[in-house]
Amino acid sequence: MGNGDYDSYSSGMNVESVHRVAIPPPQPFFESLKYSMKETLFPDDPLRKFKNQPASKKLVLALQHFLPILEWGPKYTLPFLKSDLIAGITIASLAIPQGISYAKLANLPPILGLYSSFIPPLIYAMMGSSRDLAVGTVAVGSLLMASMLGREVSPTENPTLFLHLAFTATFFAGLLQLSLGLFRLGFIVDFLSHAAIVGFMGGAATVVCLQQLKSILGLEKFTHKADVVSVMNSVFSQTHEWRWESAVLGCCFIFFLLVTRYFSKRQPKFFWVSAMAPLTSVILGSILVYLTHAEKHGVQVIGNLKKGLNPPSATDLVFVSPYMGTAIKTGLITGIIALAEGIAVGRSFAMFKNYHIDGNKEMIAIGTMNIFGSLTSCYLTTGPFSRSAVNYNAGCKTAASNIVMSIAVMLTLLFLTPLFHYTPLVVLSAIIVSAMLGLIDYQAAIHLWKIDKFDFLVCFSAYIGVVFGSVEIGLVLAVAISVLRVLLFIARPRTFVLGNIPNSSAYRNVEHYPNAHHVPGILILEIDAPIYFANASYLRERITRWINEEEEKIKGAGSTSLQYVIVDMTAVANIDTSGISMLEEFKKSVDRTGLQLVLVNPGSEVTKKLNKSKFLDEIGHKWVYVTVEEAVGVCSSFMLHTQKANPMKDESEGLNNNI
Amino acid sequence: MGNGDYDSYSSGMNVESVHRVAIPPPQPFFESLKYSMKETLFPDDPLRKFKNQPASKKLVLALQHFLPILEWGPKYTLPFLKSDLIAGITIASLAIPQGISYAKLANLPPILGLYSSFIPPLIYAMMGSSRDLAVGTVAVGSLLMASMLGREVSPTENPTLFLHLAFTATFFAGLLQLSLGLFRLGFIVDFLSHAAIVGFMGGAATVVCLQQLKSILGLEKFTHKADVVSVMNSVFSQTHEWRWESAVLGCCFIFFLLVTRYFSKRQPKFFWVSAMAPLTSVILGSILVYLTHAEKHGVQVIGNLKKGLNPPSATDLVFVSPYMGTAIKTGLITGIIALAEGIAVGRSFAMFKNYHIDGNKEMIAIGTMNIFGSLTSCYLTTGPFSRSAVNYNAGCKTAASNIVMSIAVMLTLLFLTPLFHYTPLVVLSAIIVSAMLGLIDYQAAIHLWKIDKFDFLVCFSAYIGVVFGSVEIGLVLAVAISVLRVLLFIARPRTFVLGNIPNSSAYRNVEHYPNAHHVPGILILEIDAPIYFANASYLRERITRWINEEEEKIKGAGSTSLQYVIVDMTAVANIDTSGISMLEEFKKSVDRTGLQLVLVNPGSEVTKKLNKSKFLDEIGHKWVYVTVEEAVGVCSSFMLHTQKANPMKDESEGLNNNI
C-alpha cells in the first residue's frame, strides 16, 4: 500500500494523524500462563511485602500471614480487652445452651457442644482473619451430620460408632477446607454476592427467630427441621402445651434487650448498656428462676452438666471401610456448607465494619480448627450466624473474644456447670431473637430493588430458599442465579449504534446521548462484551439485524446508502476461536452485500488473536483503526472521492481493493 | 456550581468543549424487562417477517416456520433429488445393521432398530432445520436406556414390561425436548462451543472406529462400554478369536472407500465416485459372501429379519407408579443427552456447509419425532454422529435424504429383508470407519492451540473425556470448562494503565501501545469487564495496587505527585450493587489519601445505576466526563492553577470542594 495512493483518496484527512493499531509482540506461552495464574490465584500479591526484606523480617511476616494474632496481638490495648471480655463472656453464656441443643440435634452427647466451644475457638483466634466471627457448632451442620451418618449407623443402637464417625467426618471436613485454602481457591467465595448475603442472613435470622418459639413457649417437643412451614406446624399443632410463664418471661427479656439496644443506638456514649444486657439477662433470669423455682412451673432451664475437659479422640477416628466412605462423604458435604456459612457470616460482618476478609486465610483457619477439633472430641464447627451476631452486638473488637469464650467454657467445664443449672432457656432465646431482629435488613432489600432488579431477585431467592427450604437451598439458589446472571451477560451482550457528539470527536451510544448524530453512509456499532462461543451466533444475528434496520431506514428516508460498518471493539475484552469464526463469516456476508467492515480499537488480547488467525490480513490492516473518529474520517473521505470520481458502487469496490 | 467559578479554574480548557455524561431517562421496569426478555429469548426476532403481511401470507410463513419442508420443498430440484437419493439409500443401507446392533445394545428386540429408522426420519424431514442430520438411534442413548431401565426391570425376565418402559421413556424424552424448544431455551445449546464440538467429534469418531474392530476382526463377544480402555481390553483379551477372513475383507473395503474419497477430493467432478462407494461396497460385499459362502468362514452377516411395518404402541405406554418414575427419569436424562448429541452433530455439519441451525426449531423437531416414535414402536432417536457423517459424505442436499432412507427402510421391512441376509457386517464397519477418519480434525485442534490455549483445553478435555470416559463425560467436561472460562473472565477482569498516543486525543493501554505517554500527576485506568459481585473485591485490590505501584514509581523518579485517578468505564458494560458498594468504598479510601477519583464514559446502564444509588452525587457530577481527553484536560488545568495559586495540597483540596 503506497502512502501516495492512500493520501490521494483520503483528501479530507491528514494522513499523519491516522494511527495504526499496534500488534503486541508474541508472548511466550508459559509467561502468559504465569501471569494469568498469578492474577487468578494471587491477586493480592501476598509476596509483595516480603520483597526487599531481610530474612528475619521475612520470617516474622510469614508467621504473621499464617497467624494473624501475631499481627494484631502486639497492638492489643486495654479498651479492646474490655470489649472482648464482655463479648467473650456474653457469647460463652450463649455457647453453652446453643452447644447443648445443637449436639442434641446431631444425635451426639450434649457435652460435645461444650467441648466444641473450647478447642476450636482457640485455634481460630490465632489463625482467623475475621474480628467478629464467634466459633461454634451450627444447626445446619448438626442436622446434616445426624441425617447423613444416621443412614449408615444408628445413633441409638451403636452410639460409640456413631460418635467416632462424627469425629471422622469432622476430620475430613477440615481436610477439605484446609486444602481449598492452601490451593488458594478462596475466590470461589466471591460468588456469594452482597445481595445473596443480605437475603441469606435475613432468611437465616427469620428461621432462627421462629425456632426460638420452642423455648419461649416452653415446648418440649419440636421439629428438627428449619423451614418456616415445619416450625409453624410444630408450634400450632401443640397450642395446649404453650406455657404462659415462659412466654411472659421471654417477651419481657426481648423487650428489655430491644430497649437497651435502641437506647445505645440513640446515645452512642452508653454503648455498654446494650453490650451488657445479654449477660445481665442471663444473671437476672437465673436468679429469678432460682428464687421463684419457676423451673417447676414450665420455665425450662439448662439443668445438670457433666464436669471435665475434652478427652483426646485421635484414636477414635475410623479409617476402615465400609464406614470411612460415609464419613468422607458426610465430611465433604458438611465441610463445604459449614465453610460457606462461616465465610458468608465473616464477610457480612466485615462489610458492616468495613474491613477485609481473606477467603483463603479463613479456609485455612476453619480447616485447621476442624482437624484439631476432630482430635479432641469436637464435631464440626464454623462461624455460626447467631453467635457471631451476638458477638458483634456485644461489641467485640478482635478474635480475642473467642479466647475469652474458650476460657469461660473451659472454666465452666471445670467448675461452673452448677451455676448454669438455673439459667432459663427462654433468656437465651430472647438474646438470640433480639440479635436476629437487627439483621433482617429489609432496607437493604428495598435498596436492591431500586437499583438492580436482578440483585433483588438473587436476594429474594436466597431469603425464600432459606425460609421455606433450608440454608443450603437458599445458598445454592442465590449462587445459581448469580452465576446465571453472569452467563446471561455473556450470552446476550448489549450492542449499540454510536453517533457523533456535537463539537466533539467522541462517538457514543445514540440512545444514551440523543444529541449524538448519525454519520451518513456509515453504521457505527459497539459490542459491549467479549465475543465468546456463548454469544457468537447471537452477535452475528443481532449485528445483521442492525444493518437491515439501518438499510430499511435509509430506504425510507432516501439518504446516502450504507457503505461502511464500523465495529467499535473497545469493550470487547477478549475473543475465542468461535468469535473469530463468527467475525470471518460476518465479514464474508458483509462483503457479499457490498459493505466494508471496519474495526476500531481492538484490545491487545483481541489484536493478538485476530493477527494469529490471519483475520487482520483478511480484512486488511488499513481497515483497522485506533479511534472511531479516524475510521469515520477515512471512510467519509473515501465516499467523497468515490462520489466525485465515479458514482458506481462496483467501481469504488475495485478502487478500494487496489489500495 | 457556577459556570463562572468553573471557568476560572479550568483556564487551560475551553468550557464549551466539556461534555456532560447524560443520565438516561428512567425506564419503566416492565418495559426494560420486556426488552431483555426479547433479546434473550427472541434474538432472531422471528415475528419480524410477519410484519406488514396479509393474513394469508402470515399463515404460510407460520407454517413454513414450523415445517421447514414447506420452505425448501417448492424449491426442490432434480439434481438435489439425485444427491438425496444416493445419500438416502446409502444411509438406509447403514441404518439397517446399525439399528439392529444398537437395539441389541439397549436390550430391545432387534427389529425396533428398523422401526426407529422409519417413522422418526419422516417427521424430522418435515420439521428439522438441518440438511445433513440423518435420524436414527444412538449408541449412547441405547446404552443408557438399557442400564437405567435395567436397574428396575430385568429385560430377560420381563421383556414386555421392559419394552413398554422404553417406549414410555422415549415419550418423556420427546416431551422434554419439545418443551425446551417451545419455551425457546435453544440458546443453552450455544454453550457447546466450536472447540468443544471439534473435541467431541474427534473423540466420538475415535471411539466409534475402535468399536468397529468387533466386526472387522469377526469377534462375537464384545464389551458394551464405549471407552478406549474397555474396547482395547475386549479386543486383545480374545486374540485367538480374531478371524483373518473378516479382517482382510474389512481392510480391503476401508482401503477402497478411502481411495475413492481421496480421488473425489482431488477431482471434484467425480464426486459421485465417493458418494456411490458405500452402496457399491454393500452390494459387492453381499454378492461376494453369497458366492463364496464366507459366512461359514468367520465373516458375520446380518442374517434373517422379521417382515412387517411398525405396530402402534400408544396403549403400551406405562403411566402407573412405580415404573413411571423410572421411565420419566430415564427419559429426561437420555432426552437431554440425545438432544445435545443431535444438536452438536447438526451444528457441526451446518458449520462445514456454512448455514444456520435454529436450536429451538431443532428441539421441537427432535421432540416431536420422539413423541410420535414412542407411539409407533420406536425408541429414542436423534441425529447419530456416524449416520449423519455418512449422509454428509454421500452428498446429501436436504432433509429429503431422511425421507429416502425412511422409504428404503419401509420397503426393506415389507419386502427386501432377504436381500440383506448376506450383507457382511464388516462392510458396514468399513463404511463407518472411513466416514469417521475424515472427522478427526487434528488440524482444527492445532489451530485452536495456536490461537487460543483455553479453547484448546476445552477441545482436548472433550476428546479425552469421550475417549477415556464416555460421550456424556466428554460433553459435561467441555461445557464445564467453557462455563468456567466465562466465570473466570468475569472474576478476574483485565485492568490497564492508559497513556496518550502522540499527536492524538486517544488514550490507550500503554502495554499495547508502548509509544503512548504518561500524563504527570494523573493515573488513567481502564477496567475491561462489568463490575459484578464476582470481581468487586478483586478490582478494589487490583486498582489499589496500580495506585501504590504508580506512587512508588513517582517517588523513585521524583516527578509530580499523583493527584488524580481517572477510571475509564467505557468497557464496563454493567454494574451490580456489589460493584457500586466497591466504588463507594474505593472512593472513600482514595479520598483519605488525598486523591481525586474521576470517572470517564460510564455506559447508559451504569450511569443509570450510579445515579440511582446517589454515587454520582457523592463523587460530584463534575468529576464524570465523556472522554478521557476532556477529563485529563480539566485535571491538568486544575493542577496548573493549584500550583500557581498555592503549592499546599490541603488548600487545593479545599478549593476543589468549593467548586
Image (spheres, coloured by chain):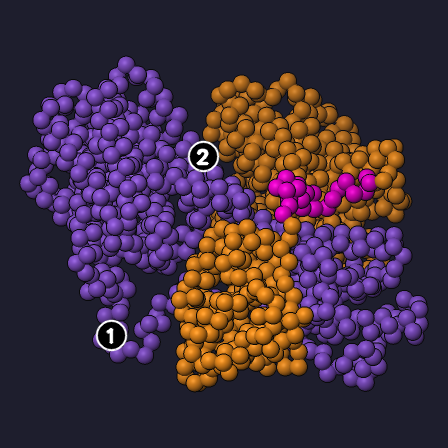
Chain colours: A purple, B orange
Q: Chain of mark 1?
A: A
Estimate the x, y position of residue B251 in percent, counting from the top left: 65, 54
The chain letter for the residue carrying disc 2 is A
Find the distance from the CA under tag 1 to the CA under tag 2.
50 Å
Label of residue A440 in the image? none
What residue is shown at x 24% (from left), y 24% (from top)? A248
Q: Nearer the viewer, mark 1 or mark 2?
A: 2
Give the residue number, with chain letter if any, for mark 2.
A464
Q: Residue at x 27, y 68 (%)?
A: A62
Residue B276 vertical placement versus B649 (above, below): above
Residue named by callout 1: A57
Please, what is the three-letter code of the amino acid marked with disc 2? Ile
Residue at 93% in and 69% down: A647
Q: Is A54 contained in the magenta span?
A: no
- B122 with respect to A109 (left or right): right
Q: What residue range appears in magenta?
A: B26-51
Q: Tell me the quadrant of the picture where the N terminus of chain B can be found.
A: bottom right
Compared to A602, does B573 lie above or below? above
Closer to the camera in the image, B159 or B443: B443
| Figure label count | 2
> Is residue B29 part of the magenta span, yes or no?
yes
Residue positioned most to the top: A240
Mainly helix, strand or loop, the magenta region? helix
- Dot 2, how many residues are within 10 Å of its Cα: few (below 14), some (14-19), or many (20+)? many
